Image: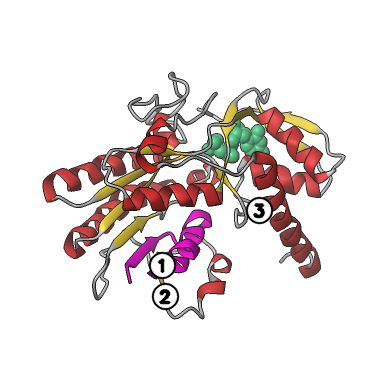
Amino acid sequence: MPRALVTGGAGFLGSHLCDRLLDDGYEVIVMDNLITGDLANIEHLFAHDRFRFVKYDVTEFIYLEGPLDYIFHFASPASPIDYLEFPIQTLKVGSLGTHKALGLAKAKRATFVLASTSECYGDPLVHPQKETYWGNVNPVGPRGVYDEAKRFAEAMTMAYHRYHDVRTRIVRIFNTYGPRMRLNDGRALPTFMLQALRGEPLTVFGDGSQTRSFCFVSDLIEGIVRLSRADEVYPVNVGNPHEITILEFADKVVELTGSRSRIVYKPLPVDDPKVRQPDITRAREILGWEPVVALEDGLRRTLQFFREKVARLGEAGPGS
Ligand code: UDP
């Protein structure tokens, strides 16, 4: 039975990864300091005899008894408002946290999987983004804390591979959505869904012509699990190449929810990437993977989750 550590396992992606690994028969240990993670994402796993949660800040030395086959390093604030609120923690978990997790991988001879990001490409001058593109990142802008931490994490991961012969994998994750996203994480999808469900105007930043490509979480997890078992040390993009403008995306949410919300325009955040679309040729070739969930289906499944969550908040009343 493989034994895996998932850092950031109480977060949106980390918790879905835990579900999948447990289904596949793994023993799973989660470490999370819960600054952006939420126990509600993993409480259904507490009774599972192959699951263990440790509240821990992985920027500190990580001690874990027993053998370990995989480390999935998923800990990090990951939405623009989170890394604006936690800039130092974001830099620390990408740098010190990656170092500690790699040290543990080396000691245990475990396979290390880094959750990297399309933010490595910054505001890209090459479109769609291939893994060979080095990116266009502003190191001193507000997003720099996340982008540079992840770029450092990739460099550190390659160094541990080259100098310590650690089995490493780097997945560059593009925009992903699905159940368990936080209502208030500030990202386009939860914000729009919440606004639509409450009949409030949808806040589109800029003129809404910037693009993103949204991947449903089950597709993403499949790609990551395949990469963890493949033999590829260089970064692999995992995301959905179906690209749409943020304005089209807002319209889709309004349509799907049957809301009467209108659109209002707000200033574009600093360094907001104008385009984003993964080139997934490498994922197709190396992993035999591509997304299978259509945007409408994924949005419907996500909407169900948000409806229930909003209803529960309503029952709990204001201030909850
Ligand atoms: N966005 C928006 N309204 C919102 C939140 C986000 O128009 O209320 C835009 C944001 O400026 C960006 C895109 O939606 O262009 C995706 O933003 P998100 O925060 O979801 O993720 P990012 O891809 O920027 O990390």
Residue kind at label 1, given as amino acid type: Val
Mark before the other along the chain sequence, 3 or 1: 1
- Residue 77: x percent and y percent? 47, 50
- Is the Cβ of the residue at disc 2 closer than 8 Å to that at disc 1? yes
Position of residue 149 relative to residue 242, above or below, is below
Q: Which residues are magenta?
A: 1-28
Badge 1: few (under 14), some or many (20 or more) residues near its Cα, within 10 Å? many
Callout 2 secondary element? strand
Decide: is 42 above or below 214.
Answer: below
> What amino acid type is highlighted by mark number 2?
Arg
Q: Label for residue 183?
A: 3
Mark 3–mark 2 distance (CA, rounded to whole Å): 26 Å
Q: Dot 2: few (<14), some (14–19), or many (≥20) neighbours within 10 Å?
A: some
Q: Residue at x 37, y 31 (%)?
A: 139
In the drawing, does residue 255 fall left or right of residue 86? right
Q: In x, y percent, where is residue 244?
A: 63, 28
Please tell me the numbered disc located at residue 52: 2
* Residue at the (41%, 31%) spot, across then down: 281
Residue behind mark 1: 30
